[in-house]
Image: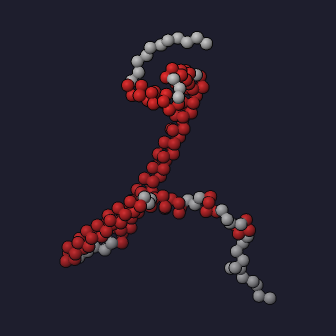
Amino acid sequence: MSKARLNVFIEHEHRRQLRRLTALKGETQSAIVAAALSSYLSPDGADRREAAIISRLDRLSHQFDRLERDQTILIETVALFIRYTLSVSAPIPEAHQSAARAQGRVRFNQFIDQLGRHLQRGGSLVRQVHQEIVPSEDDFVGLDDDETTAPDKSNTETAPS
């Protein structure tokens, strides 16, 4: 197959990458550029690019769904906590308010310290709560079929004879 000479201008960074690749692969620059052009211009190249983009979009969609779920859990948790706290907290007499404020500052600082330690460990309370609410299939592995279908005989009463 005859080859045509082509002079093109490329970015300096692309040229550096091409030189690194030729040294790594032991190929000529022409061979690598020809392979890249063939891949780019081939009909199935577009399909592969589209499949890669779809895969990335699916991954982003799953990540977005997890973020949305976590945010919903967080909002509901805070709302329930606020409702509960406001409903069970008795008003503090005027004479005790300064001590209560001081105690509140101490408790808040303890909370911030505990939160910092929890985040440094990489733990996620939201993930932990989700795992408790929605058990995985692994949680059911090991149960015998007899255990899941047989009625519990320990609480059955026998009729007197």
**Between 136 and 33, the one nearer to me in the picture:** 33
- Residue located 51% across and 42% down the image: 59
Image position of 90 (left or right of 144): left
- State the image coordinates of residue 94 (x, y, percent, origin top left): 20, 75
- Residue 111 showing in the rendered view: yes
Q: Please tell me whether residue 137 is drawn above or below residue 97 in the rendered image.
A: above
Q: Which residue of the protein is positioned furthest toward the bottom in this rendering? A: 161
**Between 61 and 74, the one nearer to me in the picture:** 61
**Between 118 and 89, the one nearer to me in the picture:** 118
- State the image coordinates of residue 75 (x, y, percent, origin top left): 40, 56
- Residue located 35% across and 61% down the image: 116
Image position of 4 (left or right of 152): left
**Between 20 and 42, the one nearer to me in the picture:** 20
- Quadrant of the snapshot with the C terminus: bottom right
- State the image coordinates of residue 48 (x, y, percent, origin top left): 57, 30
Q: Please tell me whether residue 4 is drawn above or below residue 93 in the rendered image.
A: above
- Quadrant of the snapshot with the N terminus: top right
- Residue 37 showing in the rendered view: no
- State the image coordinates of residue 80 (x, y, percent, origin top left): 41, 63
- Residue located 73% across and 65% down the image: 145
- Residue located 58% across and 22% down the image: 42
Image position of 106 (left or right of 53): left
